[in-house]
Every structure is written in C-alpha cells, then in structure tokens.
Image (cartoon, grey):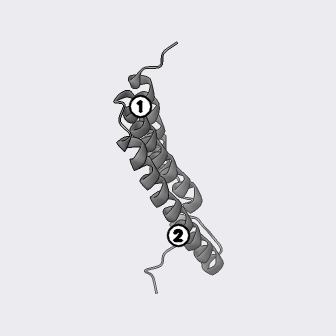
Amino acid sequence: MHIELNHYLWLSAFMFTVGVIGVLVRRNAIVIFMCVELMLNAVNLSFVAFSHFLSDIQGQMMVFFVMTVAAAEAAVGLAIVISLFRNRQTVNIDEINLLKG
C-alpha cells in the first residue's frame, strides 16, 4: 500500500484547520497555545511530505528550525500564562484586560 502526497496534504490541511478554529473559538490561553502548536505541526507535516516526495532534504531541515522556534514560543508563552495566572487568577482571555488601568 502506497500513501500518496495528497493524503499527507489533506491531513495537514485538516490539522491546520482544527488549529485555526481552536484559536478563533477558544478563550483559554493554554488551549490557544496548543492550537498554535497544532498549526505549526501541520506545516511541519507538509514540509516533511514535500521533502520526501521531492527527494530533497531541505524540507526536513526547515522542520528543525520550525521546531526550535515552536519550543521557544512554548516556553515564552507558558511563562506569560503563568505570570498572568499569578496576577489575575485566571487564564481566560476574556477576563484578562491588561490595558485597563
């Protein structure tokens, strides 16, 4: 059984769509960060699929850079969420209004 490129791209598009819907619908900051990570993983899947089917290593190398940025984003994002929770006792985006004095 051979899996074609379009199967990977459909899965990647589905993952990206779920991530976008999660970012737009959810109000919990941690869930929003998880949805952003899901979108980054969808892009990584596309990079690896194209890299494999084109027999080129550049897509897989790009995945390492994206994963590095995603790890840094997760660390900074989690630090911000922890800081907001300590100050406001909530991670709900609607209840956090930092511009209001």
The image position of residue 75, as x and y in percent, is: 56, 66
CB within 8 Å, label 2 to label 1: no
Picture residue at 47% right of the left edge, 78% below the top: 98
The image position of residue 42, as x and y in percent, is: 45, 41
Classify residue 46 by image quadrant.
top left
Amino acid on which the number 2 mark rests in the picture? Val
Q: Nearer the viewer, residue 92 or 35?
A: 35
The local secondary structure at tag 1 comes to helix
The image position of residue 2, as x and y in percent, is: 48, 15
Q: Nearer the viewer, residue 55 or 78?
A: 55
Mark 1 surroundings: few (<14), some (14-19) or many (≥20) residues within 10 A: some
- The residue pinned by badge 2 equals 76
Picture residue at 47% right of the left edge, 31% below the top: 11
Classify residue 69 by image quadrant.
bottom left
Picture residue at 51% right of the left edge, 46% below the top: 38
Question: How many numbered circles are shown?
Answer: 2
The image position of residue 33, as x and y in percent, is: 53, 57
Amino acid on which the number 1 mark rests in the picture? His
Q: Tell me: residue 84, above or below residue 20.
A: below
Alpha-carbon span between mark 2 and mark 1 = 32 Å
Numbered badge on residue 52: 1
Q: Nearer the viewer, residue 38 or 51?
A: 51
